[in-house]
Image (cartoon, rainbow, N blue to C red):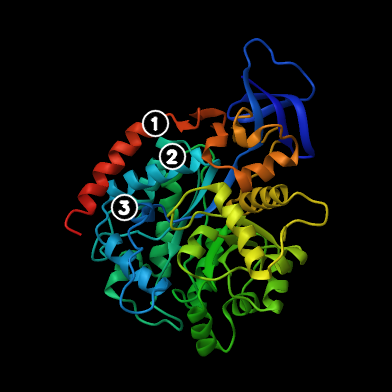
Amino acid sequence: MGLHFNTVLLADGWASNVRLTLADGRIAAIERDVPALPDDEQADIGLPGIANLHSHAFQRGMAGLTERRGRGQESFWTWRTLMYRFVDRITPDDLEAIAAQAYVEMLEAGFTRVGEFHYLHHCAGGAPYTDLAEMGARIAAAAEQSGIGLTLLPVFYAHGGFGGAPVSAAQGRFLNGPDRYATLFDASRRAVAGLDGAMVGIAPHSLRAVTPDELKAILPLAETSPIHIHIAEQTQEVSDCLAWSGARPVEWLLDNNPVDGRWCLVHATHMTGSETKRLARSGAVAGLCPITEANLGDGLFPASSFRRQGGRFGVGSDSNVLIDLGEELRLLEYGQRLNRRVRNVIARAGQSTGRALFDAALAGGAQALGVEAGFSVGAPADIVSLDAGHPNLAARGGDDILDSVVFAGGHGLISGVWRAGRKLVSDGMHRDRAAVAARYKTTLKCLLAGS
């Protein structure tokens, strides 16, 4: 199969009249400055698909339902209480329907792979399913239906606070000890075995939910696979960690564990200058979720200083309150501008900010999910095409395209998406959008009835 672009972003920059030969879901050849062949599919502008490195798919069903102010001060912790009420109702069928909707929307937004930070493991009340990976298998089914690439990250969750504090009843569906988690990890691998390009990593939920001995026990399961952890998302978490250990969360993790390029530290919002420098030098990826972090009032990641130290980052949609790749990148930059009261913070001198954001998210997201980034021979054919006829791309070329995508764009710019060589999005719409949305709406009506 041939795919011809008028202009495309290759590993070494923009190129014109590029023909990609696709075979077995991968890029078999890249030809520059060539005309389209008669049977080629032709498109205007080509970009590599980006990985969404952090998702809680089930939370897509809560989008817009937590925006009413209570009597006290609202925070992540009050939001979490509402989330626990919602999660207690979800069946395996519900999870599959909600995840499929989220994944369709991710593909339409230009995400071609998702890192599913999956902690909803057990039945309501906490009893395990006969197959420990029943819920993980439903995530895999949703990925298969939508066509998105999947890095499944089954979560280890054992405690309700630092130092092995007891859990609440609301957390019962998440819990495993190290031995049962090892069984869950193996079952998760079997659950995704039939998916093209799928892989499984490990995800200790947070330092609140895992003791040092438990973390040490589960890390060998990862081998060379990704390791993801929530960390330093809220100021209360930092205070609680200091009270427990005498160290801040990122500081403690770096002091006590072999953090390297396999790791993704999700959020890492509240760091000192020393922590920021050390995280950057570790080679780990900072997993940033600007829409969710803004929605929850978490704070701003120190992106400017992290980037100056050579730090790597990617972006994720986390709570899925809004699934929009351009908006994640835009909010990341705008948060820095508002905080520092200057413009064009993430880019180096003379560099396009849109290009800087895109390149960093492309490389960081792929590293965090254990896959290749960008277009090269042998790489997965994960491709996004843009509509050059859209008014927001009028007379744009080169990096101006990415600046317009990030700062003046929207979903309307995306015309097509290919994942592993299969075209899943045409004219901006996923091929199964109607069926997936119908099932999702039916599911939500049942879940929210009487709430």
Asked whether disc 1 touches disc 2, contact meaning CB atoms under 8 Å apart, the reply is yes
Q: Which quarter of the picture shows residue 335?
A: bottom right
| Mark 1 or mark 2, earlier in chain | 2
Marks 3 and 1 sit apart, C-alpha to C-alpha, by 28 Å
| Mark 3 or mark 2, earlier in chain | 2
Give the residue type at disc 3: Asp
Query: Which residue is pictured at 25% across the width and 63% down the height?
Result: 127
Return the residue at label 3.
131
Q: In this view, does 137 lie above or below 238?
A: above
Q: What element carries label 1?
A: loop
Return the residue at label 1.
432
Give the residue type at disc 1: Asp
The disc placed on residue 104 is 2
Q: In this view, does 130 lie above or below 299?
A: above
Residue 445 lies, in percent from the top left, at: 22, 48
Q: Is residue 39 above or below residue 288?
A: above
Q: Which of 368 and 289 is in front in this view?
A: 289
Query: Which residue is pictured at 44% across the width and 53% down the height?
Result: 320
Q: Is mark 3 on a helix, strand or loop?
A: loop
Look at discs 3 and 2 and give the one toward the viewer.
2
Give the residue type at disc 2: Val
